[in-house]
Amino acid sequence: RTADPRLARYFYVPTWDFHGSWGNPEVFLRAHRYVQTHFPFWNASGGRDHIWTVTRDAAACSTPWGSIWHQTNSSILLTNWGA
């Protein structure tokens, strides 16, 4: 753990999505947009050192409301289906 983000190896993106088994990708899309816009570290690594937790049943799979794959495909996803 470090207070200096330049020394960090990973960045945790805190999100909370509890909208039933399918979830709502809008939560992740908004978080992605915010991190990409406000923090230079996402753009420096292309998100490769960012960790997302996705605990809904569908995890990061496509849902009837869309998918977060395009925004998080270079990141580390921790899901109930495996990382």
Image (tube, helix red, strand yellow):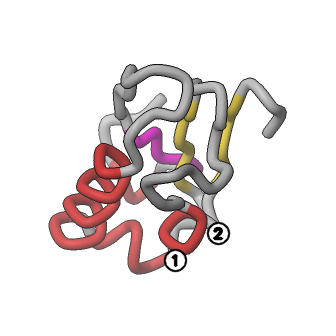
Quarter of the image for residue 48 reads: bottom right
The first of marks 2 and 1 along the sequence is 1
26 with respect to 13 (left or right): left
Q: Which mark is residue 74?
A: 2
The kind of secondary structure the magenta stretch mainly shows is strand
Residue drawn at the location 55% of the way across and 74% of the way down? 70
Q: Residues within 10 Å of mark 2 (few under 14, many from 20)?
A: some
Whether the magenta-drawn stretch holds residue 11 is answered as yes
Whether the magenta-drawn stretch holds residue 71 is answered as no
Start-end of magenta stretch: 9-13
Badge 2 element:
loop
Image depth: mark 2 or mark 1 in front: 2
13 with respect to 10 (left or right): left
List the residue tagged with mark 1.
46
Q: Is residue 53 above or below residue 71?
A: above
Quarter of the image for residue 57 reads: top right
Badge 1 element:
loop
Q: Is residue 57 above or below residue 11?
A: above
Task: Count up the numbered dots.
Answer: 2
- Quarter containing the C terminus: top right
On the image, the x and y values in percent for residue 13 come to 40, 42
Residue drawn at the location 39% of the way across and 59% of the way down? 6
